[in-house]
Every structure is written in C-alpha cells, then in structure tokens.
Amino acid sequence: DGGITQSPKYLFRKEGQNVTLSCEQNLNHDAMYWYRQDPGQGLRLIYYSQIVNDFQKGDIAEGYSVSREKKESFPLTVTSAQKNPTAFYLCASSISDWTETESGANVLTFGAGSRLTVL
Amino acid sequence: AQKVTQAQTEISVVEKEDVTLDCVYETRDTTYYLFWYKQPPSGELVFLIRRNSFDEQNEISGRYSWNFQKSTSSFNFTITASQVVDSAVYFCALSEARGNKLVFGAGTILRVKS
C-alpha cells in the first residue's frame, strides 16, 4: 500500500545534540512537507519541497534543516540551535503544488508522526 | 495573512448526540480552499473534506456534514449520532488557490463517551 513512513516514532535527545527524523513516501508525490505540532497550537509549517534538490522555509524554519536528494525522501534535522525542540513532527506529501490550476490546492497525505523529547 | 480559528478547545458528548465543530477563517484571497482533517490517537492526520471558495453548497457524507458560509467566513463540521470512534482531534485548515501550504487551526479535541 502507498503511504508515508516516518521513523523513529519516538526519539529522545540530549540538549546540544542534532537529531534527524526520516520521512519516506512511495506515493510518487512531488511535494513534501514538515509540520510541527504543539498542544493547543495546531500544525505549523517548518519546511517544504516542491521538487528534488529544492526546498523552501516555512513559518518556523529556524533551528531546522532539510535535504531533498531523492523524490521519495525528505529528512528533517533538528539542530542544537532549535531552542524548544520537544514536539510532535508530521511529514506530509502531495502532488505538485506549483501548477497554477483550479486544482492547485491538493490534498496532503500525512505520516504517523515522530515524537521528539529533549531530556 | 491567512488565519484559522477553532474556538472550541475541547468538546465532550455522549454517544448518539449530535455535535458541531466550529471553524472561522480569515483570508484576503478571493479563491481559496478549506479542509477538515481528523487526527485519531494514532497520530496520523486523515483527510475528510476539501471545499473551494466558489462552492458554498453544504455537503453530507454519511454521519458527517459541512456548512460553508462565506458571509460569516465559517466552515463548520457536524457529526450526527456521534460514536466513540469519532473521538479524535479535528483540524480545520485553509490554503491559497495556488499551492498546498495549509494554515491550520489549533484543533478541537472531541471526546465521545459511551
């Protein structure tokens, strides 16, 4: 079955350490996204990528980095510069979002999330 | 700037009751899309509906119905005869016409008790 796989599901990190969250999709989607979820704040966009080797900052990119070397993969690194990294991280994908058509706003498919806790 | 407000932080109902989740949005765009997603305890968001700004027809899908009113900038979601399996966090979201960068509301926790 097609879908998005995020790993690990739970991750603990000591302060000052970088950690990388994996996101893999087999939906043949061009666009991929990382959202952060905090209690009572909904989901906020960290980074997104419309095509391989290209990505843009979202609303809260500081302290995070991404890469998009393959269409299927969009890993997120939470760096030591992120002051409050404890959160639930959700990866999503969709068909291309750069086409200016009536169907431009497409449905996002989400992974099951990764919960990061800083000790 | 786009904004989505879900004023109800948490709602508790007894099974078989009807429940309405409110969503109010702000945008300067004339063309936009509205969404509802469900997040069960497993954590994965599940798509429920997408509505474009030119289609104000209400929609019904089984026990779910949606009321879109541009005059009040609202896109409310009603569950009829609620069931325990409806317990989840429900998110309303908004996107511009071009692009998939969704702006989410804070979410409403729905608890359905048997």
Image: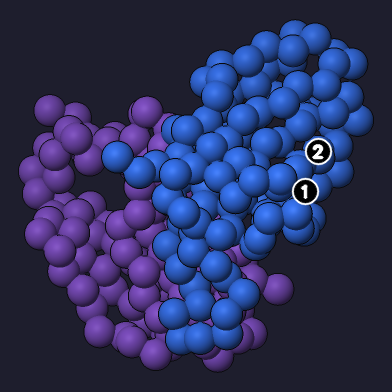
Residue projecting furthest to the front: A70
Q: Which chain is purple?
A: B
User: Which chain is home to disc 1?
Assistant: A
Q: Mark 1 highlights which residue?
A: A60
Pointer 2: what residue?
Answer: A64
Point out the image quarter for the N terminus of chain A. Answer: top left
- Closer to the camera in the image, A82 or B68: A82
* Cβ atoms at labels 1 and 2 below 8 Å apart: yes
Q: Amino acid at mark 1?
A: Ile
Q: Nearer the viewer, mark 1 or mark 2?
A: 2
Residue drawn at x 15%, y 45% is B82
Q: CA distance from mark 1 to mark 2?
A: 8 Å
User: As shown in the figure, which amino acid type bears the numbered disc 2?
Assistant: Tyr
Tell me the crowding category of disc 1: few under 14, some 14 to 19, or many 20 or more residues within 10 angstroms, Cα based: few
Q: Secondary structure at mark 1?
A: loop
Residue A3 image point, x, y percent: 39, 42
Q: Quadrant of the C terminus of chain A?
A: top right
Residue B43, quarter of picture: top left
Residue B70 visible in the displayed image: yes
Q: Determine the residue positioned at 65% across, 21% down.
A: A116
Q: Which colour denotes chain A? A: blue
- The label shown at residue B23 is none
